[in-house]
Amino acid sequence: MSPVGSLIALLLLFTSSLAQDKAVQPEARCGASFSETYKPVQIQAAQDMDCTWSIVRPANETTRVIFSVLELNPSADCSQENITILNEDFGELGVLCPNSPGIAAFESPGNVYVRVFTNSDALTRNAYLLYYSVTPANDVKCGGNLRGYSGKISSPNYPNRHQPFTYCVWHVETPKNTKAKLSFSEVFVEPDVACRFDFVAVFDGPTTNSPLKDVLCGRTVGEVETSSNAFTLVFSADYANNYFGFSVDYIATPKANSSLSCSGDSMTVLINPDYINSLGYNANELTLINKTCVANSANPIVFEVPFGSCGTVKKVKDHTVYYTNTIFASTAGVITRHRQLQIIVTCELESDSIAEIMYVTENDIIQDQAESGKYDVSLAFYPNEDFIAPVLESPYFIELNESVFLQATVQSSDPDLTVFVDTCFASPQANFQAPNYDLIRRGCIKDNTYHNFPSGSRYARFNFSAFKFLNAHPSVYLQCQLVICDINDSGSRCNQGCVTRKRRDLGSTMWKTNAVLGPLRLKRHSEPEAAGSVSEKTEDVVKTDQTSLYVMGISVLVINVLILAFVVLRYSRREPRGYRYHAVATH
Ligand SMILES: *[C@@H]1O[C@H](CO)[C@@H](O)[C@H](O)[C@H]1NC(C)=O
Ligand SMILES: *[C@@H]1O[C@H](CO)[C@@H](O)[C@H](O)[C@H]1NC(C)=O
């Protein structure tokens, strides 16, 4: 606002606060009764009180009661000290406890009773409330439910004056695994040190019962950050001194480096640009599979990925629909070694659930998996069945047919959780497009080298024998769907084992999540690697001892070929379709 504008505004504020003095007399009396159409009430209460203030209003009008100050004895228990709000029939509309947010509103037709209980501690309690009758003449329609990664909210009539007796509630939901950043470009409402009269309140959650994050009044600007992907905004104005209200822009930011949120027809990916920069890539060169699809926003980087275009691949398997796209970043400049970052995003849609899978690969090695929900589950290779120290290197080099040990761990302090491996499949590609090979599906073992170890508190363990995909695919990636259950719940999915489609009841599942891992690569792999995926590790191995390695390489190759021939023979005989360890088309 220009200096002249500010001066006018100041004058306005000054003259109108002169016009109406809001000094409200404390109601120290117990048991007063009010019959005015509206009234601000400043309650002061001492110890050992049980007082009821009665608001007497006609039954054909709605009485709205708005608390904007609540200072009860902070060390009192709610069962001893509280403010109980009752309707005409003495039914409970709500209870304000010593730890309740200071801002609360109640509505009921006709009379409303405010009953204050205090315990025996000697101190003064304060509460400020405004009540008024809502009639068709003064009712302001406002508020609403908003969804999306960004948006703008302003008071009714903004940038013009708001009306008296305005009470608006907006419920805002940003994509999962994000938090919201609110930037108030203007707040211009009646000033008061305690923001008792007109105010903008931000609740850190989906309802006005969520913790109160901030209350703004007077002339100000401000930034508020929520802790989750839902917040509630309240705007309340009383009977006089109506200014211009407020305007706020909000934008979602990923809680960690990145976040993915799936809906019925698209997925929303948010990435912190600093994260992309820290990996050495340029944030504004990111594209989807279809290179014409670029980010919708730069900070945070937002991709709204439609299921039907931009190169999104759809795959249907076992009544589950998977939509996958990939965000690519290539290093700029003339670099001979091909380095490429891929952020793979998959929405897994079932009739009753949606799962989000997001991970980062660099040079086709899975680097980073975004936490996708309530529980963070990690999947790791172990060198043996002691399950003591996980394999840290990636790719994990292993001999053909050697046992691969895996543990899925839920990161939680709750010892009563356990993990169940529902489905695990392998793919030669980091994006898990076809071919896929099932190790276990819906708890039913599909690979006869697969074996589950007894699961325990916060983990599930299994192993299988290393294999390779035919047709020169050097890598094996694993994707597992894991179910987290209460260890003491005998009816949970974790205790159901193999479940066929007909009785696919998840039981009392607590949580379902996905984890990816890979790649596994065969040691001293002789076939040419896929372009650009030659890793330093292979070179190291080669450098160690040329002659013995050469001999060993030959013998391993011979053994590999023999084993492979044996395996192919064995399974092509036993299973006539003969797709064992073979590229299994899933389309
Ligand atoms: C509020 O306090 C009164 C008096 O101590 C008590 O009877 C009532 O149960 C309390 N309400 C709640 C919800 O604790
Ligand atoms: C409620 O009823 C009273 C009289 O009974 C009437 O004066 C008043 O206008 C009514 N209010 C509304 C909102 O209809």
Image: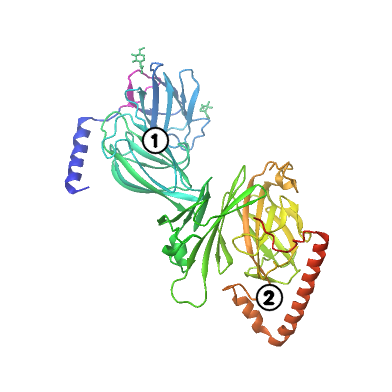
Disc 1 crowd, CA 10 A, few/some/many (<14, 14-19, 20+): some
- Examine the structure image and report whether residue 37 is included in the region drawn in magenta: yes
Residue, x 40% and y 17% (percent of image)?
A: 60
The answer to whether residue 411 is seen in the rendering is no
**Marks 2 and 1: CB-CB under 8 Å?**
no
Q: Amino acid at mark 2?
A: His
Q: Secondary structure at mark 1?
A: loop
Q: Position of residue 405 (x, y in %)?
A: 72, 63
* Quadrant of the picture in which ligand 2 is shown: top left
Q: Position of residue 300 (x, y in %)?
A: 42, 56
Q: With respect to residue 399, does 249 lie above or below?
A: above
Q: Position of residue 1 (x, y in %)?
A: 22, 47
Q: Secondary structure at mark 2?
A: loop
Residue 439 as seen in the image, left or right of residue 345: right
**Mark 1, residue position:** 143
Residue 169 as seen in the image, left or right of residue 510: left
Which quarter of the image is occupied by the C terminus? bottom right
Q: Which mark is residue 525?
A: 2
- Distance from Cα at disc 2 to Cα at disc 1: 63 Å
Q: Residue 170 versus residue 267: which sits nearer the camera?
A: 267
